[in-house]
Image (cartoon, helix red, strand yellow):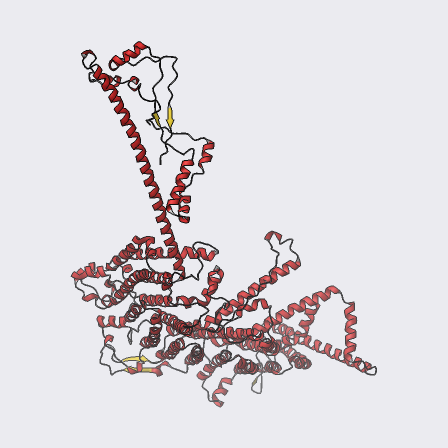
Amino acid sequence: MESIAQLIVRSSYIGTNIIMMAWSITYLSWLTFVLLIWANLIWLVPNQRKSMLRSSPFLVIYAWFLLISAYIYSVDVDLPATFEGLDLAEIGFVKMIHLPCAPLFVKCLYTTMFWVTLRQYIQERAEERHSSALADMAAPLQITVGAASAGTNRSNAAGADGQEKTGSKVMERIGQHLKRFLTKFWIWVVAITLFAVAITGQRMTGFRILYMALFLIFILSFQFSFQIWRKMMFGFWLTVIIYSMIILVMVYTYQFKNFPKYWTEYLHIPEEQQLDIGLEQFETTQLFVRLVTPTFFVIITVIQLHYFHNDFMVLSDPKNANLVDAVVEDLEQSSMQGGAYVDRSEKEEPSSQIQFDLYDLDNITSAQFQLLLKQWLKRLHRAKNLCYLFLELHMAKAVLLFAMLMCVYDKCALYFIIVVLISLALTFGRPMQTFAIYFSSLLVSIMLLARMIYQIQYITPQNWDVNCTVTENPDINMTTKNNAPWFGFEKGSHLPTLVKWNIIYILVVTLWAVILVRQYNYRLSRGRPTTRAFFMFPNIKRTDADTNLRNCLKYLANYGYYKFGVEISLMMTVAVIGTRMDMYSVLYAIWLCILFSMKRSTLSKVWLFYLIFLAVALPFQYFMAVGLPPTLCQEFPWDRKDQLLHSLQDWAFLLDNYHSPPVKKLILDFVLLLLVSRQWLVFRIERRYARGEYVGGSNDVIIHNAEEKDFKNPVPDFITYARSYLDIFKRAILQSFLWITLAIVFLAGTNRTNIFSLGYLVGAFVFLWHGSDFYLKPIPTILKQWQWLLGYNVSVIFIKTAFQILGCIFIHDIPTNCCWLVQLLGIGCVRKFGANVVEPSDSDGPLPPGQQEYCTVPREFIGIAWDGLCFGLLIMQRRIFHSYNFFHIVDECKATTILASRGAELIEEIRQKMVHNQEEQEHRVLEKIKMKMDRIKANQQKLQDSVKGRRKYRIKPPVTNKQAIRSGDYYMFDDLDDDDDIDLLPEEQTIDEDDRKRGTNKPDIGELLSTAMKSDMSAAIHKHSQAAVTQQHPQRGLHRQYSAPLSRKRSTRSSTRSQLSAAFSAPPTVSVHASPRVVQYREYQER
């Protein structure tokens, strides 16, 4: 705390200087004016502290004089107010009537600061005398003053406390960081204050205009040359300080009586022009506020000049920039555009093996915390460098975009030059871009100053008026027009609103210059080439894009537009068509019909003409939006009240004196021109590397490689093997993108009811009907069929755009009986700018009563939003068809189809064999049954023949069901063999646990298909049959019961009887002791 107090005391001279200025503007008089001049002179001298300390005794004496005089005039006595015609109040002898102690108290506080400075001066004089005495004493002993002083300091340091040393070091480091921070950013505080002083205020004055001029000189010099800006900095700050002091003195002295008369009599400047200059007498309540602004600006500018300027010059020197660890330097490595690739091995980060958890924060050591903090700081530094590099690469395009936005939202004739420069910059590359940006910044700065000058009361807008009395149109005859708004000059009460786009553009260009300077100094301080960067990640090649998701994103950051530039440009063309829907949209649609179906080699030759068309159309359309100067009094046919001609003017984007075309349409035209120009650069790179290998890969046609036998796909298989998240994303996006596209095409056909939706439905159903078999066709056939769908989509876009002629111009002339055709074709007028009229019935002029009811088309059925969405998906799917990744999708589909076909063949063959075996088995069983029935019939016939002559034993045919059942018995089968088995009844077999375990070895369909793929079909069937034979317990079988005759006792009599009267007797009696019937089962496997 003691060191802080000493620092404050040593810096008291700054406060004294500020108090002198505060005293002068608080109490306006000629005596305090002396303090103002005194303070300003001290601000200007080089050694300000020494000058202030030396003048502190005289300052205290002068303050005494002011206090004593103020005290005398505060006494309640009758003192003179004038002396020989002079107003003593203006001199400084003011008679205070109410609370005379208040100003005395304030002046005493001001004087206290003067006493502090005087005390500091006396202490330093005493120290100097003490040092001089030590030098005189040490001179005979040949001891230098420095040695003596060092010895004294060492003795004092030895007696100091260690804790105080640590505290002083901490405060010293804090002070160093604070000073470094202020050195970096105080200059911007001064610049922002300079701009605020110039832009704020109720009345436009010459003082504000000169402040703005100084600010623009400061900014423009920084934009044009950083080295020149550094060299002129000292002189610039000195000029600003002198100018501010002159303004302060002029405003201060103008507050005295008779000074306006002096300006009028001696300088011949009228009072109105004095107000335009900035000289105005203020009320007592406003005077302090009016004077404190220039005073404050003088103070902060002097602080910059005397305390931060030298440090800033050292800090801004690239040779003195601080170096960082080499770990983060590889981010800025850059190869030239199209240059030979230099392989730079990436340095591994020194990672720590210690992993920290949130629960371990209490137990973390200081060393571990420092290591963790260092790692995070490196990551933040790397992220910051990436942001700067991204801005360096793409900030120029953003600057041109803001320039176009300024021309659109602040439309005037002078900006036509900037629009032409924008077109040239986008067409001719980087050098032209730099020239266009800086020249536009200069032009905008001049425009800003001119607009501020136009706000002065001395300039009257009536001087720019013109009377159009020659026109033949009685509606606009004898009208008065003003040329100033056509040039961009208007009177307004709020200046920031009038010049906001000028300020925004200047600030954006300044930000771009800051980024360029930072990158230049960063590379120069690290010994790298100062050439500009072209890639964010120069170590990434095409082969690295398929390794993992991170490298893929890096590759897209480098070469994303190189790969998909044509598709993005064509999609932007469709967006411009759908947004404008006028005559230029028809022209863009014609270009779209030409470009979408061309081969890439042909497209690279035609693309230049498309670029030239856009570069010429942009300034031409801006000229149509601005129009001709009013002083020409040019008349147009659509100036009359003719609805047809007015609709034609709106659709054709023609110039108009009263209803100018909507200039906001040109924003998307600029974006389209920007994308097309970038794609033209891609085509130039492809031609440059037609015989070599480019780092970003090749855009040549590769579909012919799919049919080559020895072709090896350079892209890894992401379907069979999922090595990273990149393969998962590829599988999720590429395999489903076709079905998403067809779904959107289907929705485009169902959401709009017109004739064009039918084509979308048919196209979607045709491709969905093919399903995955669509991939089995040759890739040229796939592309040809897809090209038909894409061509239909482009045709619909062109036709709907051309129908805007009918919907916007001739909708009233369509007969009532043709309303069905209007609704069938979806004819309407799309106006997204200006009058948002979409439905034909809402256009200018009423429709006939019958037509009003039927000729309206819903708003959502008119535009091409769904068509544009379909085009984007269709053309991106076509790009997928031309990629190596699509080869893997085709191979996967073919493999799946082949496996499914072979598996179906195997299953069908096994089923046929099983049916054949079943038929043979059933045939054998049937033959056995027939054979046994024949034997039964033969035996019965023998018995009948033996009793044929005996009527009593003759067989009678059964009459009832009971007789039929009782007509046969086991005796009929006594002569049959008992080992003949006939399956009769099915029975479900239960499988115990052991049998289930053994049944698990049964081969399944997967093993069957695997065997078929490894060998052939016959071997697989043979192996399957052997496994089925060796299986002991099947899962489920069909069991049929067959029986054998029971053994029973028969006597000779009963046997004879049975032979004689078997057909008419009851069944034989079974002995109780007879053994149970042996029922045998035969297992049958159902296959």
Total residue callouts: 0
- Residue 693's image quarter? bottom left
**Left or right of 759 in this view: 126:** right
**Left or right of 213 in this view: 588:** left
- Residue 813's image quarter? bottom left
Residue 285 shows in this picture: no
Q: Residue furthest top?
A: 1053
Relative depth, front residue between 386 and 409: 386
Relative depth, front residue between 150 and 689: 689
**Left or right of 615 in this view: 996:** right
Q: Residue furthest bottom?
A: 266
Tell me if residue 5 comes above or below residue 1008 in the rendering.
below
Q: Position of residue 718 (x, y in %)?
A: 44, 56
Is the N terminus in the top left, top right, bottom left or bottom right quadrant?
bottom right
Q: Position of residue 983 (x, y in %)?
A: 33, 27
**Left or right of 807 in this view: 337:** right
Relative depth, front residue between 326 and 119: 326
Q: Position of residue 644 (x, y in %)?
A: 22, 71
Tell me if residue 393 comes above or below residue 1038 in the rendering.
below
Relative depth, front residue between 762 and 364: 762
Q: Position of residue 681 (x, y in %)?
A: 40, 73
Residue 457 shows in this picture: yes
Is the C terminus in the top left, top right, bottom left or bottom right quadrant?
top left
